[in-house]
Amino acid sequence: MGNGGIHAVDDAVELARLRQTETPDSMVVRFGADQPLPLDSGHSLGPWQIAYQTYGRLNADKSNAILVCHALTGDQHVHNIHPVTGKSGWWDLVIGPGLPIDTDRYFVICANVLGGCMGTTGPASVNPATGKPYGLDLPVVTIGDMVRSQAALIDHLGIDTLFLVMGGSMGGMQVLQWAAAYPERVFAAAPIAAGARHSSQNIAFHEVGRQAIMADPDWHGGRYLDAGTSPRKGLAVARMAAHITYMSEASLHSKFGRRLQGRDRLTFGFDADFQIESYLRHQGLSFVDRFDANSYLYVTRAMDYFDIAAEHGGKLAEAFRGTRTRFCIVSFTSDWLFPTAESRAVVHALNAAGASVSFAEIVTDRGHDAFLLDEPELFGILRGFIDSAARARGLA
């Protein structure tokens, strides 16, 4: 295939993704200018919309609803074929009939986050004031804003209390924010591979990614959609850098080592000699087909600003004081993005607040992304916690 063919494929995929921005292949709730969403920055957003998927059925008293919160590069397509990539849902190992989140028993909701690019208002959405994509004119959003938008969706669905809120990584941050901001609306919470604030190291990695995007000449100060371009190279580099943090040294060594890619000797050049180089390039290039560059800036910034204790005088326990929510905290031994120490800090704060909390550290060499992989111990822990909470909720 010549270069023209490659660009034709890229353009077709990009158009498919851009169509998801305003008219997603999922359910969407649109809030008018008379229903603005207040933001932590002091701004408000309106009109705005939130895209979501549901699985299973809501019971008569609306007590079996589970909200699944997605991670940085995820979206609402947690248990269905993705409309852009054609791939299966990102948590099909956890959600489905007979699985820990049993869709024969529970009503599962997953929404695209505020600032995203799969149907919820984000920088690629049309700014009603100009008729053009927001770009960087969209106010910066926070994890708190994301959760506030989800609460508006839950209100729209007529659900007072969520049986369970759960998610990993940035999804885990949202779980903790839900539990802190709406304790009376969360019966059980399961944050996985997450922390109550973003570390300096993680902010640093995000800044490298953002600078890679903004240094791409096709970024055009965030106005690339108006210019008919896309900072694909910068976004690909950002994804490559981030993906390294999702794995561990042991998993990288086990999966790739120093093995060469499609050759038996070094080329003494700068092509992808090693398998790990080829793998990262593939991860970067496939990512740009389904994600918006400005959304990457906004969502990483939301993670950077996350610090629950800061809103409570630096005392994390105060964020959960008096909560009746049941918690299950899970970490992984090889996760250096959100190491176990950060999960333990949350556990200690919950203990100090008198909360009901269980904690498990899973031994694995798969790194941060272990929550997305086939980890039987994780599945067993989640099943046990959910079943126990269901009995306490009267759902068993």
Image (cartoon, rainbow, N blue to C red):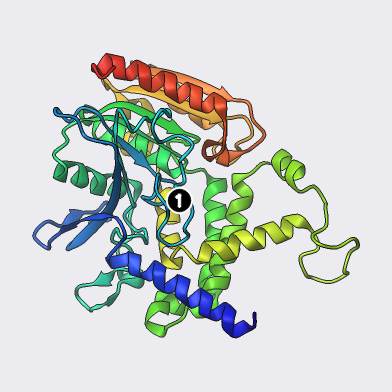
The N terminus - image quarter: bottom right
Residue 208 versus residue 57 in the image, above or below: below
Q: Nearer the viewer, residue 348 or 84?
A: 84
Residue 44 is at least partly visible in this image: no
The residue at the point 55 percent across, 80 percent down is: 7
Q: Is residue 258 above or below residue 282?
A: above
Q: Classify residue 346 as left or right of residue 374.
A: left
Asked which secondary structure carries label 1, the reply is loop
* Three-letter code, disc 1: Leu
**Mark 1 nearby-residue class (10 Å; few <14, some 14–19, many ≥20):** some
Q: Nearer the viewer, residue 204 or 18?
A: 18
Residue at 28% of width from left, 14% of height from top? Answer: 392
In the rendered image, the quadrant that contains the C terminus is top left
Q: Residue furthest right?
A: 265
Q: Which residue is mark 1?
A: 72
Horizontally, residue 272 falls left or right of residue 36, namely right
Residue 21, how many percent across, how many down? Answer: 32, 66
Left or right: 217 in relation to 94? right
Q: Residue at x 52, y 21 (%)?
A: 360
- Residue 47 at what x, y percent from top left? 17, 63
Task: Tell me which corner region of the image, top left, top right, bottom left or bottom right, holds residue 100.
Answer: top left
Q: Is residue 154 visible?
A: yes
Q: Position of residue 114 (x, y in %)?
A: 31, 55
Locate residue 50 relative to residue 237 in the image: left or right.
left
